Amino acid sequence: MKNYYEILEVSQSASQEVIEKVYKTLAKKYHPDLQDGIDKTYAEQKMKELNEAYDVISNQEKRKSYDFELENFEQEKLRNSQQEKNK
């Protein structure tokens, strides 16, 4: 499962204002039309990830649902890790 907070480089408790500001900064940094040095294919992929993450995290209903799914995913990952250690 993708961690949209990591993609946007914000904490899970970040406010909508912070998320929007960070998104705009990252969009300027990675927008393919503004790239000289880095690979445009990489920039395009990065922008797709940023847009996907921002679409979910900037919408309160989607964010609430995503946070629930992320929490369940993290708990399952932790349980699996503990089970592997106990073998």
Image (cartoon, grey):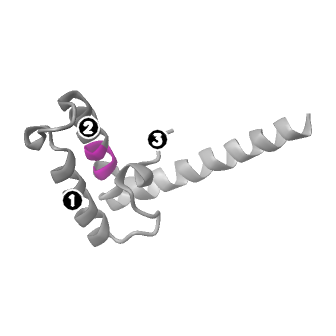
In the rendered structure, are the residues bearing label 3 and label 1 in contact, judged by CB atoms less than 8 Å apart? Answer: no
The span shown in magenta is 50-54
Q: Position of residue 21 (x, y in %)?
A: 23, 66
List the single residue furthest toward the front.
37
Majority secondary structure in the magenta region: helix
Q: How many marks?
A: 3
Q: Amino acid at mark 2?
A: Lys
Kindly give the residue lying farthest to the top in the view shown: 41
- Whether residue 53 appears in magenta in the rendering, the answer is yes
Tell me if residue 8 comes above or below residue 46 in the rendering. Answer: below
Q: Relative to 15, is 67 on the left or the right?
A: right
The disc, 1 or 2, on the residue closer to the chain's N-terminal end is 1
Q: Is residue 3 above or below residue 58?
A: above
Q: Which residue is mark 3?
A: 2
Give the camera-side residue of 24 and 33: 33
Task: Return the disc, 3 or 1, that comes first in the chain's sequence.
Answer: 3
Mark drawn on residue 48: 2
- Across and down, in percent, residue 80 comes to 76, 39
Question: Which residue sits at x=34%, y=50%?
Answer: 56
Residue 70 place in picture, x, y as percent: 54, 49
Q: Which residue is mark 1?
A: 25
Give the amino acid at mark 1. Answer: Thr
- Which residue reaches farthest right? 87
Query: At 69% across and 43% down in the image, what residue appears?
Result: 76
Q: Residues within 10 Å of mark 3 (few under 14, many from 20)?
A: few
